[in-house]
Image (cartoon, coloured by chain):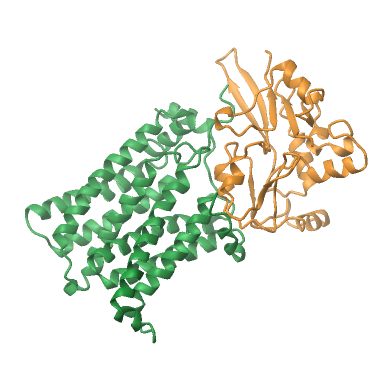
Amino acid sequence: MARWGMVIDLEKCTGCQTCVAACKVTNGLGPTIQRVTVFEKETGTYPAVKRTYIPRRCMNCREPACIAVCPSGATQQQKDGIITVDKDLCIGCRYCMMACPYNARTFYGVERSYYAEPSAWEERRYQEHVEGVVEKCDFCRDRVLEGQQRGLSPGKDTDATPACVIGCISSALSFGDLDDPESEVSQLIKARGGFQMLPEMETDPSIYYLPRRF
Amino acid sequence: MSSLLELSEDRVAFQKEWTIHGQLGLRSFNLEIALFAGNIGPGLFIISSFTGFGLGLLAGFLIVLVGYGIPHLVFLGRMERFWRAIFRPGKSWISRGFIFASLFLLFSFLSSVHLLPVPGFGQLHANAGLYQVLLVCGFISAFLLVLYPGFLFSVLRAIPFWNSPLLVPLFVLQSICSGISLTFLLTAFTPSSGIDIRVLAAGMSIILGVNLLLILLHVWSKKRSGSAGMASFERLVHGKYRFLFSIGVLVSGIILPLIILGFMHIISFIQQGLIAASVLQLLGVLAFKYSLLNVGAYSELYPG
């Protein structure tokens, strides 16, 4: 069984937020919620200032902190390593949000439309969600599974790859099997010295970041 | 100092979902109330079970039922599924807390129901052996309920300000102290309770002193626990919550009650003094819970 993971190249990321938009459209998310966030980090002092864009989503950790604290068993780890939230089991206590070191979970409260009147698309897509439960990035698991069933390769074929990876304009995102040493993600981590965020939390995230070289 | 504050607050994210700033807005304020009521209610029950103060047992039950149970239900995103919280006591502190609260409500109700005009429950009080068993079970469940929030917060490594073993004894001492305060307030209206006020006041003074030390130790230790701990410290001591912390938690909640109790030990105990010290102490506990929730910050994602 593969362990799906992502590599984010901090050198290539331009902070354009296309991954955020792709995620919102694919998952039918309204204005109050987003599963992907892009942070800006400015370092150095003028004139030697450097700005880095840091996309963040659920790290789908191998040793997740969120599963242990969930009182209802709604948060589960699938065989492919992806962490999912069963929206029919979640009670909305949000303890998992407090336990996640990456602050990568969101609460689906009362959704509203982008404009005064909800569009037909919004009315239809918002029905896919359950109000009052926690949501998170699951690497577009349904899309990946469907693609696999059709014989496609996640990370290589568009229809079996997370929407944010497909949407990225600068190819800063890569998706694939972390347990396969020949996969693109494993090769990138090895070649560029990929690192995980907050390793001291001992959660072993499935997202690796490639450092900026200059 | 302001530049340091801006820097530290800019680099980390403060948790919002357990405060009124979260998605559910005012509905989330219930958690702050619940945290307060879940601390003072069991404390009152513990003190009352020692002093044999029946009204305190009943009040402890009612405070937890109305101030803790109902606000927690309202806080949940899907309150109709609250019963699912019981399923993982081996792993989740929320599950444990749910069990502790249920046990406390059961035993505190059975221990105090004879004070209510409910037919058929008088037998429980009439049978001395059975009543003692209920009281002991109530005491144990109250103590577990007092311990629970301290562990709930302290196991969270994601939020360094909460990730401290000091929170457990701090919550326990605040609970006992609040139980004494509520006893003072209740006995003001029931003078024939036979409770030794002097002993309780002396105990309260000692606990307040230890509480002060624990709070200062906890807050100052976080100053050196990374950027998130530093941001929480700055927000609490120099930032948005500085008045709530300094005036509400320290001055109102600890120092003034200590001064009032100290004067009364030297001169004489007067009802008004006890009421003032008790109200101030309870306000201090509420201010502490509120500020604790609001200064919790996540670790900085990308320190480099």
In the rendered image of this protein, which colour is used for chain B? green
Q: Is residue B74 left or right of residue B220?
A: right
* Above or below: residue A128 compared with residue A20: below
The single residue placed furthest to the front in the displayed view is B129
Q: Is residue B62 visible?
A: no
Q: Residue at x 28, y 50 (%)?
A: B253
Quadrant where the N terminus of chain A sits is top right
Q: Nearer the viewer, residue A135 or B10?
A: A135
Q: Position of residue B101 (x, y in %)?
A: 45, 62
Q: Is residue B210 visible?
A: yes
Q: Position of residue A87 (x, y in %)?
A: 70, 55
Q: Which chain is orange?
A: A
In the rendered image, which quarter is residue B210 located in? top left
* Above or below: residue B249 compared with residue A179: below
Q: Is residue A147 left or right of residue A198?
A: right
Q: Position of residue A176 (x, y in %)?
A: 80, 31
* Above or below: residue B175 compared with residue B228: below
The single residue placed furthest to the right in the displayed view is A150
